Image (spheres, rainbow, N blue to C red):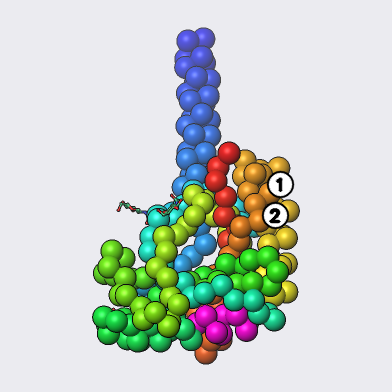
Amino acid sequence: MGSLVRTELSIVFVLLLSLFHLKCHGIEEVKGYPASVNCATQECAPYKVIQSQKEFEIRVYNNSTWVSSPVTTSASYKDAVRDGFITLFNYVRGYNRAKVNWNMTAPVLTEILPKSSFQVYFYLPKKLQNNPPPPYENQHITPVKLPRKKFGAVTRFSGYLDDANIAAGLSTLKKNLKGTPWQSASASSDYSAADYNPPYQVKDRVNEVILWFDKN
Ligand SMILES: *[C@@H]1O[C@H](CO)[C@@H](O)[C@H](O)[C@H]1NC(C)=O
Ligand SMILES: *[C@@H]1O[C@H](CO)[C@@H](O)[C@H](O)[C@H]1NC(C)=O
Ligand SMILES: *[C@@H]1O[C@H](CO)[C@@H](O)[C@H](O)[C@H]1NC(C)=O
């Protein structure tokens, strides 16, 4: 009798142990999207993933220094990014008052504003975070601290970013956030598109739509 109870107890114990293991294992397996391949050779803006699901992930970014080109009203995302990119790329390649240059970072971040307006940002590498090279006045480049909001809800897709896939990404992201603990994010209208790869890279392209929000 005593040994039967002991056997039953040990079965219960083993069951509990495996349940516990499953649970921990499940938590460990929650990982964010893999780093874009070029982040192995380029500095990419760091972030921390605090929740990951199949359709999206929630990130926290440290407040860090980026440089922005002016807000432009453009016919399309692609036009806006081409213009902003050239302005910022020249600055990176040494057209600045300090005449210093550095390697491209990733991603190229573009804030999508109402009325077909856009603002393009480059992340400054670690060594320049606290001393952004001063731009010439006629460059209209501004160092800024980002993000303005604490959290980013992120969806990822491949290909080349354009107005259509950005809009589709945003709408899917908002739909997927409904009914989750991050529901409040879906009411935000503050969003950006992130392009991680140079245009000549055709394979393994990584694009993101990031919806910025403050936790409620
Ligand atoms: C943010 O900054 C702190 C302090 O420098 C650092 O410990 C942490 O790893 C950073 N987090 C991210 C996501 O970069
Ligand atoms: C710039 O990139 C090249 C090629 O990846 C690398 O060899 C070099 O060390 C980088 N320079 C800096 C300052 O990070
Ligand atoms: C980052 O810093 C800027 C400027 O100090 C501030 O406006 C912004 O709210 C900060 N963002 C976060 C998420 O703390």
Q: Quadrant of residue 129?
A: bottom left
Question: Does the image show residue 87?
Answer: yes
Q: Say if the magenta span includes residue 81.
A: yes
Q: Is residue 83 magenta?
A: yes
Q: Is residue 90 above or below residue 30?
A: below
Could you tell me the amino acid type at mark 1? Lys
The magenta-colored residue range is 79-85
- Please give left or right for residue 40 compared with residue 5 in the image: left
Q: Which residue is mark 2?
A: 174
- Residue 112, percent from left and from top: 62, 67
Mark 1: C-beta under 8 Å from nearest atom of ligand 3 = no
Secondary structure under badge 1? Answer: loop
- The residue carrying pointer 2 sits among few (fewer than 14), some (14 to 19) or many (20 or more) residues within 10 Å by Cα, namely many
How far across and how far down the image is residue 11, in percent? 52, 26
Alpha carbon separation for disc pair 1 and 2: 7 Å
Residue beneath disc 1: 178
Label 1–label 2 contact, CB within 8 A: yes
24 or 95: nearer the viewer: 95
Residue that protrudes farthest toward the front in the picture: 137
On residue 56, the disc is: none
